Image: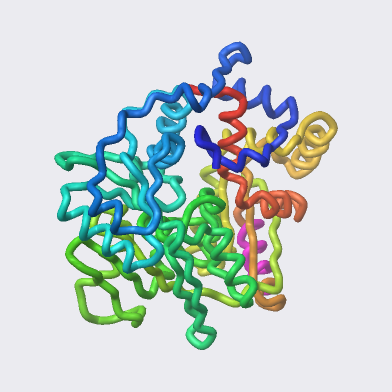
């Protein structure tokens, strides 16, 4: 990921000129207002404080270069992106520690506790709530605990659960399971960079949560390593006893300890996937359609409703201009529709199941007044379902800071 923004520096999304103009108009930004990120060597970082030898020797890998510290100093909220682009950072870790396994995490926490060093767990660095900010408080120093080496994958094909290391990125975890014929079905917009541990620590929700569930809903067991020891919840997914330690760890944002292993439910990789676009009359009408689908248990696996503004921007970004725009307007006009709100619906699973559930969903969509746009819009969304970071990345490439 770029040190100053979202996305792979080798991958660039080329937007149509009309889309660039539309974005600038939406944001009120003129071309002459563009601000490029400062050079890497111009970034100002706080001077690193000394890390005790006992802490350094507790793990196998220590990184303390300026770029290593910079890359783990901020998440990817918009304020974070502005700070990174302007090179003005008020906090940064004094060093980065990379343990090889859960035992190494425990050794680091023990050493840091004994030597007054604060620890900030680090996964993919996509936090938008300040979760990776290197705040030391009353401690003498602060380290970033990078979990990149904790990448184990175990699949129980009988119970259909997967036990995963917290350092696995979304694509790496999905690829490993797809190779074994399974899928997690969890695709947040941060998918390409975020990690399994981050999904659990933030109670992540994804593009297909209506069908597969939020990440906290599919976690069956979790392991937390804290300065006082290690906690591992039972593998039993449901129990009548309480309180639930699993629920305490999920969403803890790294404040209670470090998540060192996650077991979650998986599904067989779907042999059939079908996506299509619809146009609701308004956001309110679309909301009622979504409500009806959910309450009648007929919601697609992917169900996304855009408001009027997002619909307009999405169509611009898709290059719907000129003849395409006129053709779309004419099509909607024939159906007594002017404008509206875009809905993306996707069904996954066995062919007969997809056919049956799609038929039920389409009936409710039509009853709610939605107009079908066909499969092309759905396929375009499906191809770019992991594209959230790259759209943000492209906005930053345009020099947009508001």
Which residue appears farthest toward the right when viewing the image? 323
Left or right of residue 33: residue 46: left
Closer to the camera in the image, 186 or 93: 93
Closer to the camera in the image, 117 or 369: 117
Characterize the magenta stretch by its predominant secondary structure: helix
Closer to the camera in the image, 143 or 83: 143
Is residue 113 depicted above or below 31 in this figure? below
Q: Is residue 100 visible?
A: yes
Q: Quadrant of the N terminus?
A: top right
Is residue 215 depicted above or below 384 in this figure? below
Closer to the camera in the image, 94 or 87: 94
Left or right of residue 152: residue 392: right
Quadrant of the image occupied by residue 235: bottom left
Residue 110: x percent and y percent?
21, 60
* Figure label count: 0
What residue is at 72 percent from the left and 34 percent from the top? 14
Q: How is the image coloured?
A: rainbow
**What are the residue bounds of the magenta stretch?**
355-366
Residue 225: x percent and y percent?
27, 65
What residue is at 27 percent from the left and 50 percent from the top? 119
Which residue appears farthest toward the top when viewing the image? 32
Q: Is residue 365 magenta?
A: yes
């Amino acid at each position: 990921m770029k040190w100053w923004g979202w996305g792979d520096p080798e991958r660039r999304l080329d937007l149509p000129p009309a889309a660039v103009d539309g974005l600038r108009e939406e944001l009120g930004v003129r071309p002459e207002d563009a601000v490029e990120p400062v050079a890497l060597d111009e970034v100002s970082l706080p001077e690193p404080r000394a890390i005790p030898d006992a802490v350094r020797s507790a793990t196998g890998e220590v990184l303390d270069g300026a770029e290593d510290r910079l890359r783990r100093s901020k998440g990817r909220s918009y304020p974070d992106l502005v700070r990174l682009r302007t090179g003005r950072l008020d906090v940064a870790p004094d060093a980065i520690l990379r343990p090889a396994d859960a035992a190494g995490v425990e050794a680091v926490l023990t050493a840091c506790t004994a030597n007054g060093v604060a620890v900030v767990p680090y996964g993919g660095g996509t936090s938008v709530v300040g979760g990776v900010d290197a705040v030391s408080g009353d401690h003498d120093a602060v380290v970033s605990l990078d979990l990149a080496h904790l990448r184990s994958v175990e699949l129980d094909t009988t119970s259909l659960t997967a036990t995963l290391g917290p350092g696995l990125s979304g694509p790496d975890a999905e690829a490993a399971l797809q190779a074994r014929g399974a899928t997690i079905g969890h695709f947040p917009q941060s998918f390409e960079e975020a990690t399994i541990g981050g999904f659990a620590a933030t109670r992540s929700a994804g593009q297909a949560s209506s069908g597969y569930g939020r990440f906290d809903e599919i976690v069956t067991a979790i392991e937390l390593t804290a300065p006082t020891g290690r906690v591992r919840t039972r593998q039993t997914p449901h129990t009548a006893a309480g309180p639930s330690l699993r629920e305490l760890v999920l969403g803890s944002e790294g404040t209670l300890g470090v998540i060192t292993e996650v077991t979650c439910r998986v599904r067989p990789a779907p042999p059939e996937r079908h996506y299509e676009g619809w146009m609701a009359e308004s956001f309110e009408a679309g909301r009622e359609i979504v409500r009806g689908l959910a309450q009648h248990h007929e919601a697609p696996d992917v169900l996304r409703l855009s408001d009027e503004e997002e619909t307009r921007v999405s169509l611009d970004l898709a290059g719907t201009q000129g003849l395409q725009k006129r053709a779309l307007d004419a099509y909607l006009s024939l159906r007594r529709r002017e404008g509206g709100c875009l809905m993306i619906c996707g069904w996954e699973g066995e062919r007969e199941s997809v056919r049956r559930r799609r038929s039920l969903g389409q009936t409710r969509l039509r009853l709610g007044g939605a107009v079908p746009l066909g499969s092309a819009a759905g396929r375009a969304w499906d191809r770019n379902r992991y594209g959230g970071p790259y759209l943000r990345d492209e906005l930053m490439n345009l020099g947009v800071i508001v």
